[in-house]
Image: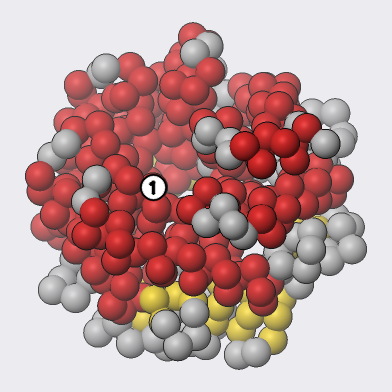
Amino acid sequence: MMTEEIRTHLTNCIIPFWKKMRDDVHGGYYGYMDHDLKVDRQAVKGCILNSRITWFYANAYLTLGDESLLEEARHGYEFMQKYCVDQEKGGVFWSVACDGTPEDTTKHTYNQAFSIYALSSYYDASGDETALKTAFDLFHIIEELCRDEIGYKEAFDREFQEIENDKLSENGVIAQKTMNTLLHVFEAYTELYRVSGDDKVKERLKWILDTIAEKIYNPGLHRQEVFFDREMHSILDLHSYGHDIETAWLIRRGTDVLGDKTYEEKMLPIVLDLTSQVYRTAFDGHSLANECEKGVVDQTRVWWVQAEAVVGFLNAYELAPEHEEYLEAARAEWDFIKEYLIDKREGSEWFWDVNSRGEAVSGKPIVEPWKCPYHNGRMCLEVIRRKPHRKWRENAAQ
């Protein structure tokens, strides 16, 4: 009974864990818990962390109807508005100190996008018009200050002067544009369009889908490229398995919200191709490898990659139910998560990663600016919200 197991895990583990991370003195949520489960109440608070937690609680409320979840979302929202949003220069900071004082005043397109994502969902949950207005303020900032004729630029100082993109560059390169930022602008705009129906947002969604199809997706390699120069030429041979399986279902989500048959038909083959390639090259029967750089596979089992795989494989099964292997892959992923990634220690949540044998040996923190209930909490909500296919129900009952 995968769906019921996941619902139970959401309500008994993930939701209560993050409620305990709430800071009732300074607002928002504490930014760090080490591997030994010690909370650092003086740690910086990532604005991405707090926007993702706000998004999570707003959507948990919309899905489960528990008023305490709306209160948690409100707590995160009020911290975002008071401290994460730059009241003088506009936009959202990268991080603030534990008391809300600006800590890293970088304005990153990725960060603006996640704030839109959170604010749109909070507006849906609460009806707070100020949240929607702030979301549109950030939409206009991205469109007017953070893009050129080719795509979205990445990193800026407090005054929105472009700076080096060290925060969204990895694997030894500094990228001027990234698949990751484009994907999450798309994700944020999908949510903003869903709650507003705004025509300008709709047109930008279509433009991003065209860009994914024409510049990000590599049909010859059946994958997305990841890091780019300013003109959107790939600068590294890298296959990010987690991002590809996540992109696949987020594209489907976006085309569903758009309701445009032309884009549904255009993007469906890409959705299925990305999923198929990840299944063939990264899935070993129970879990996903992390990535493949220049032909070398990183076999680490990263928490967020496994969470996105559950949703991505279910998404592909819904689109192509004749491929029952995707349903079995989703179930196998959940079994792996239960056995190895969920930390059974009292007061914990999920490990950051495990090795290919399921051993948590890296010692990475349980909470830090990138580790929050966005991927695993969203996985739970997506599984609960989706209407299971008949064979999904039958197999789950076995």
What residue sits 45% from the left and 16% below the top? 70
Residue visible at 46% across and 60% down in the picture: 248
| Residue 11 position within the rendered picture, expressed as x and y whole percent measured from the top left | 67, 22
Q: Give the quarter of the image for residue 130.
A: top left
User: In terms of depth relative to the viewer, which is nearer, 340 or 353?
Assistant: 340
Quadrant of the rendered image containing residue 276:
bottom right
- Residue 259 vs 171, above or below: the answer is above
Q: Residue furthest top?
A: 67
Report x, y in % for residue 35: 79, 46
The residue nearer to you, when weighing 34 against 129, is 129
Please tell me which residue lies in front, 346 or 79: 346
Label 1: which secondary element: helix
Residue 282 in view, yes or no: yes
The amino acid pointed to by label 1 is Arg
In the image, is 165 to the left or to the right of 266?
A: right
Taking depth in this image into account, of 342 and 316 the one nearest to the observer is 316
Residue drawn where x is 33% and y is 50% of the image: 254
Q: Name the residue under label 1.
A: 253
- Is 220 placed above or below 197 here? below
Question: Where residue 184 sits: x, y (%)?
Answer: 38, 55
- Colour setup of the view: secondary structure
Residue 103 appearing in the image: no
Q: In which quarter of the image is residue 194?
A: top left
Counting from the top left corner in percent of width and height, residue 325 is at: 69, 59
Callout 1: few (<14), some (14-19), or many (20+) C-alpha neighbours within 10 Å? Answer: some
- Please give left or right for residue 209 compared with residue 310 in the image: left
Number of disc labels: 1
Q: In which quarter of the image is the C terminus?
A: top right
Q: Going by the image, does 319 lie left or right of 182?
A: right
Q: In which quarter of the image is the N terminus?
A: top right
Instruction: Name the residue rendered at 71%, 76% in the picture.
Output: 298
